[in-house]
Amino acid sequence: MHPRDIGLDTMSSPIRNAFLPHYLYIPLQQHIGSPAEAVVAPGDVVSRGDVIGKASGYVSVNIHTPLPGKVIAVQDHVTATADRVPTVVIEVEGRFSLKGQVSRQTDAWKSLSRDEIISRMKEHGLVGMGGATFPMHVKYSVPADKKITTLLVNAVECEPFLSADNRLVIEHGEDLVTGIEIALKALGVNRAIIGFEADMPEAVARMRGLVANRSNIEVLVFPVKYPQGAEKQLVKAATGLEVPSGGLPLDIGVVVSNAGSLVALKEAVVDNKPLFERIVTVTGDAVEKPGNYKIAIGTRVADVLAEVGLKKKPARIIIGGPMMGLAQYSDQVPVTKGTSGILVLSARRAAVYRHRPCVRCGKCMTVCPMGLVPLLLVSRVELGMDDEAKKHGLLDCIECGCCSAVCPSERHLSQAIKLGKLRHVAKKREAAGD
Ligand code: SF4
Ligand code: SF4
């Protein structure tokens, strides 16, 4: 399936520089794994790029401040997943440049060893920026019994509305190529594939031009089809190989990284710049100036909206895209490393789901890219029969939202399945005594 493509309104919007909030709310948990530990306290003065949270374990990364200022609190604050997590609050003040570090193209990084590149990933707080926020150094520390052959670069960005990666490739294509070279060195492989969707012609042309003389980097263009950018779907389309149920791409020799993550890798390794800001698509029918903005991590959505302006009363704010994004109950949530989009809809555009009884049409089943039977999964989850749901592939669901989008009864299918998966994780943690 492919939802009506309403992303084109920002596809040609050049990246605009960050604006300055008065306060930053920087969560210490922006990644999968253990939260970073605060290394600052109220009253401390910090400079742009300082570490304010230290990685607390192997699956954890450092957190940095994007702007200078004074720490005024370390307190719990709400995030886009509705969790309250320890957060460093900074009053922005002091001297700094809005333009950020100067982007360089030097070959000095080539003298770094694989281990040095991987430790730079952790130090500079790199995580998967496509939404998964899995620490990059863990993904690139491939176990000795796995043989990697291919780096797959995800530039597909198939969610309607989102166009940040499209602009990043067009405007920072050289940085992406350098990021790919660094990633290849970290993995010890020599083959990369960059995957695009067919509705990104400018980005495709740009990248084809940049890699024309490199036989080890291939550009592939896939049909416009949601969820083409989902990891398992992309691996299948690019390599013809299928990731086994419950497995990872590395089980079949592939490491997948989002294009934005690889630009961040270049900035960390070549420019010595930590991951403390990112490109975010801000759009929706309620937004006055939709576009792609470079936003400091820790900026609250309310401050972003004050800057981009609202032309209609917002009825729904979604962090991410309309298919997989999370509806928010507060505009106080901050932009984090995993925030690819902020979608603001008026009452006219915000779908109101009425959740009527199932009419057994089977549409949810026919669109599921994982070959699951959503209706069946949901009934098991609703009855608390989690083991049964697992037998029917609960954990294979990629939460793409296709089933909910096509259901004529407007049932909350993907949401219910997601709930079942969360319950499974909570039970596992409880059993492990976490
Ligand atoms: S949300 Fe899950 S069950 Fe529904 S279509 Fe996507 S993969 Fe299938
Ligand atoms: S799409 Fe909705 S109505 Fe149709 S079978 Fe699935 S749950 Fe039932």
Image (cartoon, rainbow, N blue to C red):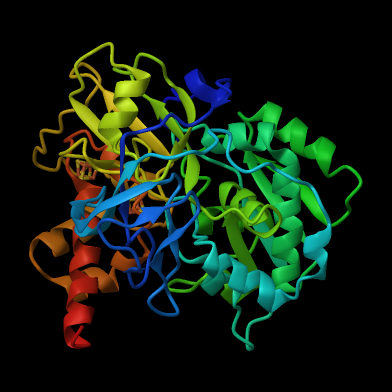
Count of labels in the image: 0
- Residue 167 relative to residue 358: left or right: right
Residue depicted at 48% across the width and 38% down the height = 95
Q: Position of residue 232 (x, y in %)?
A: 52, 59
**Figure check: 399 above or below 189:** above
- Residue 25 relative to residue 141: left or right: left
Q: Position of residue 28 (x, y in %)?
A: 32, 61
Residue most extreme to the top: 311
Quarter of the image that includes the N terminus: top left
**Quadrant of the rendered image containing residue 265:** bottom right
**Figure check: 326 above or below 255:** above
- Residue 430 relative to residue 219: left or right: left
**Figure check: 243 above or below 329:** below
Q: Is residue 406 at least partly visible in the picture?
A: no
**Quadrant of the rendered image containing residue 424:** bottom left
Q: Position of residue 14 (x, y in %)?
A: 58, 23
Residue depicted at 68% across the width and 74% down the height = 116
Quarter of the image that includes the C terminus: bottom left
Depth check, front residue: 285 or 279: 279
Depth check, front residue: 272 or 315: 272
Depth check, front residue: 192 or 404: 192
**Quadrant of the rendered image containing residue 334:** top left
Q: Position of residue 141 (x, y in %)?
A: 59, 77
Residue most extreme to the right: 213
Q: Is residue 206 at least partly visible in the picture?
A: yes
Residue depicted at 57% across the width and 47% down the height = 260
Depth check, front residue: 416 or 118: 118
